[in-house]
Amino acid sequence: MKAAREWLSGAIKLPQAKKVILECHAAAREAAASPVAQAAARAIGQSASTIHSARHCIGLPLYGAIAVAYNTLGTKVSWEQLEQCAAAECGCMLDALRAVAVDNEPNPAKIDWKC
């Protein structure tokens, strides 16, 4: 997202970036008739939100995987089928992350998940 990159580079302030991020969430609400579009918009909004809270990173795999499941299976299947498809997509995401992971990362992320 352009606004997130601009904030990271110092070109804009966080309130300006957050305004654009909130537009992603508004787009998700407006896309209620399309579960694929709604989940995709939420995935984008959550991903962009990581600039102010690292915990938002969990939104990409969760909303992204359900967007893939809706796109693959449609909306007329059982929730269990959607969950299985989403779980498989999360497995693909995990494999992709493992492929680019840095062994013995000297500066690992320190996220306070508040769980």
Image: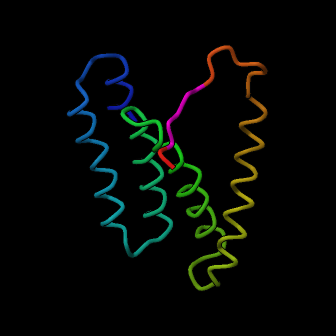
Judge whether 104 appears above or below 65 on screen. Answer: above
Residue at left offset 71%, top offset 62% = 87
Figure quadrant of residue 84:
bottom right
Residue 50 belongs to the span the image colors magenta: no
Identify the residue at image location x=63%, y=67%: 69
Residue 70 percent location from the top left of the image: 58, 70
**Quadrant location, the N terminus:** top left
Magenta span? 109-113
In this view of the protein, which residue sits in the foreground, 53 or 79? Answer: 53
Front in this rendered view, residue 55 or 75? 55
Q: Residue furthest top?
A: 106
Prevalent SS, magenta region: loop
Please state if 67 lies on the left or on the right of 96 as rendered.
left
Residue 7 in the image, given as x and y percentages of width and height? 32, 24
Horizontal placement of 87 versus 115: left or right? Answer: right
Residue at the spot x=45%, y=44% of the render?
56
Relative image position of residue 38 (x, y in whole percent): 43, 64
Image quarter of residue 27? bottom left
Q: Of residues 114 and 61, which is closer to you in this image? A: 114
Circle count: 0
